[in-house]
């Protein structure tokens, strides 16, 4: 009789999603069965609250299951989770990726295994293979962050920046393609810092070029969130010349006001974001841009917020991830003068509304165009610029489609062109 599978509950970013697959594999290797493992996110207080709520619900519904908590929130707040009666064990971000951590769970004397993440110097290639049931594969190439933005707790959950060697990345990309993935997304915590810690300091642009050259069978390559100020000529050259590098770029912009950016301790100005988008658009006219934006940062005035609203149009952003500012204990921003929560929520709602308008315009601009759509599930796929399309087709196939209509959430195509 086969053992019950472990259930992995993932919060947060693509990197967490990637690591959840590694967690699944390592726990299975260790012989763990029937456990519920929460891979948490610490980026906002709301993410932490949601994870705690989900843990309580899981215990009510599964009174006999072993519940293990890991991820960034477990790394930064291990005692808070250890004190929850619903939790059986807490693992740090380094520990979660080793089978021995799950083998040792029977040792109740060490219920919390969270070591100093800053002592981790290497990123082992924690590759999990193609995601079960997914056409697109996520490939982790970097972890951690050397920057200390005043609002961000993530460096204390992930440690300092470290990169996977190019050879290991390319080898795993080959495996993913051989396993049937037509599209790969490169991901990391601070992706554009890739390579600074490796011999010869290869950049993200170098990695992209090498990967596309040495894995010619890969149909599509995507890049997850980037810090545009860290991109170099090699990266922009790849944008211009590599058709298999998809023209969708998600920026860690955070604000559209220069004073707020300084108080965030960001390394770019408003003009840098606008100029980057304009430059890429000249190289790839079909490019689409998304951005992470924080609403209601401490000391943000109405005029400062308006500058962020205007950034959506000035930079031509259409895919927004809006975060109402959430103070994280231990960060400088938590000690700054805070805005009223009602103001923060109202500004976040306005920013989301502006983003929805921009996305609707983007979708309308694609009506009448012919797009190569990769079907992610039966009847639903994405264009190179990441727009979702409802069109007849089987998951995993490419469909050449003429876009017939646009809705706020997706495009429609009557039939293949």
Image: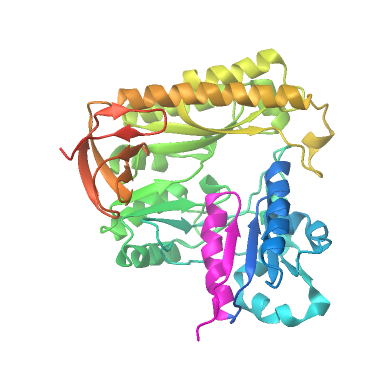
Queried whether the magenta region covers residue 402, the answer comes back as no
Q: Point out the residue furthest to the top here.
A: 303
Decide: is 158 above or below 313: below
Quadrant hosting residue 253 = top right
The magenta segment: 1-29
Residue 177 image-quadrant placement: bottom left
Q: Is residue 77 above or below residue 233?
A: below
Q: Compared to 400, does 180 lie above or below?
A: below
Residue 256 visible within the image: no
Q: How many marks?
A: 0
Q: Position of residue 307 (x, y in %)?
A: 60, 17
Q: Residue furthest left?
A: 417
Residue 100 in the image, given as x and y percentages of width and height: 64, 79
| Viewer-proximal residue among 137 and 287 | 137
Left or right placement of residue 354 versus residue 91 in this view: left
Answer whether residue 392 is visible to the viewer in this image.
yes
In this picture, residue 118 sits left or right of residue 255: right
Query: Residue 213, percent across and down?
Result: 29, 55
């Amino acid at each position: 009789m086969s053992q019950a599978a472990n259930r992995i509950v993932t919060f947060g970013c693509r990197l967490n999603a990637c690591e959840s697959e590694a967690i699944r594999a390592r726990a299975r290797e260790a012989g763990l069965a029937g456990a519920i493992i929460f891979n948490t996110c610490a980026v906002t207080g709301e993410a932490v609250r949601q994870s705690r709520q989900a843990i309580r619900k899981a215990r009510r519904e599964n009174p006999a299951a072993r519940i293990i908590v890991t991820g960034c929130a477990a790394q930064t707040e291990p005692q808070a989770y250890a004190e929850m009666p619903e939790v059986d064990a807490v693992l740090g971000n380094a520990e979660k990726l080793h089978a021995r951590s799950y083998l040792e769970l029977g040792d109740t004397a060490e219920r919390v295994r969270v070591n100093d993440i800053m002592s981790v110097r290497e990123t082992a290639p924690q590759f999990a293979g193609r995601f079960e049931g997914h056409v697109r594969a996520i490939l982790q190439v970097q972890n951690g962050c050397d920057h200390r933005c005043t609002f961000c707790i993530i460096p204390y959950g992930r440690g300092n920046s470290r990169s996977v060697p190019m050879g290991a990345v390319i080898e795993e990309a080959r495996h993913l393609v051989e396993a049937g993935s037509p599209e790969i997304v490169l991901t990391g915590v601070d992706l554009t810092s890739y390579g600074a810690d490796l011999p010869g300091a290869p950049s993200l642009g170098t990695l992209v070029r090498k990967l596309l050259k040495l894995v010619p069978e890969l149909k599509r390559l995507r890049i997850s969130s980037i810090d545009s100020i860290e991109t170099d000529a090699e990266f922009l050259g790849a944008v211009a010349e590599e058709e298999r590098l998809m023209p969708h770029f998600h920026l860690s912009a955070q604000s559209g006001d220069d004073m707020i950016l300084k108080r965030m301790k960001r390394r770019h100005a408003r003009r840098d974001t606008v100029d980057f988008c304009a430059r890429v658009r000249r190289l790839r006219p079909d490019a689409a841009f998304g951005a992470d934006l924080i609403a209601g940062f401490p000391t943000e005035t109405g005029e400062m917020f308006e500058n962020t609203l205007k950034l959506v149009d000035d930079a031509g952003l259409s895919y927004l991830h809006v975060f109402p500012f959430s103070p994280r204990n231990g960060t400088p921003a938590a000690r700054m003068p805070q805005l009223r929560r009602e103001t923060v929520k109202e500004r976040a709602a306005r920013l989301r509304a502006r983003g929805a308008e921009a996305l609707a315009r983007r979708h309308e601009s694609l009506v009448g165009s012919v797009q190569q759509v990769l079907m992610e599930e039966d009847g639903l796929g994405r264009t190179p610029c990441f727009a979702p399309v409802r069109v007849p087709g089987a998951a995993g196939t490419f469909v050449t489609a003429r876009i017939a209509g646009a809705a706020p959430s997706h495009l429609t195509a009557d039939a293949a062109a």
